[in-house]
Image: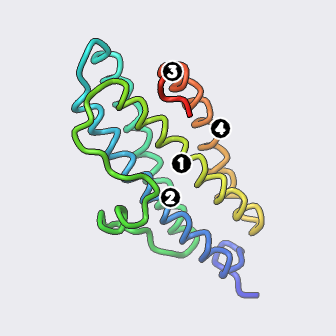
Amino acid sequence: MSKTSIGLDKAQSEVLATKLNELLATYQVFYTNVRGYHWNIKGVNFFELHAKFEEIYTDLVEKVDEIAERILTLGHTPANGFSQYLSQSRIKEEIAVSTAADCLKGTLDGFKVLLGQQREILSLANDADDEGTASQMSDYIKEQEKLIWMFQAACQSCRG
């Protein structure tokens, strides 16, 4: 069995890097969507949601960097083309969304997609004895489960 420089199985690390690149793509598209919600939100909830979306996209861009760095740590290259992101993302881009309900629903749905992807990667990482990736995914999952709960509380019509 061939090992990476950090002592992991090379074949399992390659699978993980592929899945992390798909997650990176999803994060990049979601980041762009949330940035758009921040720019385009209108209505009585403008001030509260404008600030909340900024908080979220700031956190998302940090996670983008962390995921890319994990891919590099596994010995692979992170995708960096937006065409790659659009073709690999599990989230579709949203353009000119401006109502509170639509922005909240897009954010809630986006976090649910990330949660599913991260759980898949967590399982693969555990199987590969990759504590670094497993820990990263576990941290993201815990944080985003709470955000989903909060967004569902804020948007009754977004449930489903």
Q: Quadrant of the C terminus?
A: top right
Residue nearer the viewer, 118 or 140: 118
Q: Mark 3 belongs to which amino acid?
A: Gln
Work out how far the residue at label 4 is from the one at label 1, CA to CA, in angstroms. Answer: 12 Å
Q: Nearer the viewer, mark 4 or mark 3?
A: 3
Of the image marks 4 and 2, the number of the one nearer the N terminus: 2
Give me the disc on residue 156.
3
Residue at image coords 61%, 74%: 15
Residue picked out by circle 2: 23
Give residue 24's position: percent from left, percent from top.
46, 58
SS at circle 1:
helix
Report which residue position mark 1 lands on: 114
Camera-side residue: 93 or 123?
93
Q: Residue at x 43, y 33 (%)?
A: 105
Report the residue marked by disc 4: 142
Mark nearest the camera among 3 and 2 is 3
Q: Earlier in the sequence, mark 2 or mark 1?
A: 2
Residue 122 percent across, percent down from the top left: 68, 56
